[in-house]
Image (spheres, grey):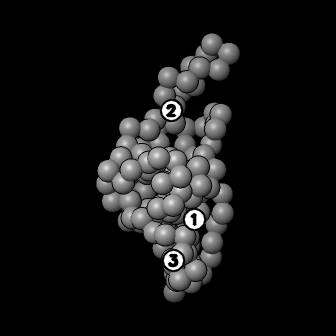
Amino acid sequence: MSKKILSVLSHPEYGNLEDSDIGLFASAFAPVAGSQMTVLLSEDAVNYGVRGQEGTGIKIAGAPVQPGFLIETDVQSAQQANIPVYAFREDLEERGIAERELIGGIKLISRREFGRFVDQFDTIWNW
């Protein structure tokens, strides 16, 4: 029987020189290993759910970081790989992010629902 894994992303990869968030990147491989993955955007990582996010054009010491961090594309790729993406409604509200600004397909849950929500998973990854 495959494991059900919840990958909770709480802290965005500020200053990351890689081309993806390591938590989101690692989560994308769970289905290949036969596990069922779900991603939950929490705290500051709810910003990953906003349409139009990307990290290209970043320069460090005058040199461009390539290929850059394609946040929206990474979230959409997870969804296309049948990895559901959720976000905490309260964390979006605290940051002034409206539901209409989100990438399509992101499901919202309340922090009050978290206990019941997390009960369906065998393992929780916290990034």
Question: Mark 2 or mark 1, which is nearer the start of the sequence?
Answer: 1
Q: Which amino acid, by three-letter code, is at mark 1?
A: Ser
Residue 44 badge: none
Mark 3, other Cα within 10 Å: few <14 / some 14–19 / many ≥20: few
**Res 24 visible:** no
Q: Nearer the viewer, residue 79 or 86?
A: 86
**Res 12 visible:** yes
Mark 1, other Cα within 10 Å: few <14 / some 14–19 / many ≥20: many
Q: Measured from the top left, where is residue 61 in percent x and y?
A: 68, 15
Q: How many marks?
A: 3
Above or below for 12 versus 15: below
Q: Measured from the top left, where is residue 124 in percent x and y?
A: 63, 72
Rendered residue at 55%/38% (across/down): 19
Q: In the displayed image of the protein, which residue is found farthest to the top?
A: 62
Estimate the spatial distance between the alpha carbons at disc 1 and disc 3, rounded to whole Å: 16 Å
Report if the CB atoms under discs 1 and 3 are less than 8 Å apart: no
Residue occupied by mark 1: 7
Residue occupied by mark 2: 55
Residue occupied by mark 3: 113
Q: Is residue 78 left or right of residue 126?
A: left
Question: Mark 2 or mark 3, which is nearer the start of the sequence?
Answer: 2
Q: Measured from the top left, where is residue 102 in percent x and y?
A: 37, 50
Rendered residue at 47%/62% (across/down): 89
Estimate the spatial distance between the alpha carbons at disc 1 and disc 2, rounded to whole Å: 22 Å
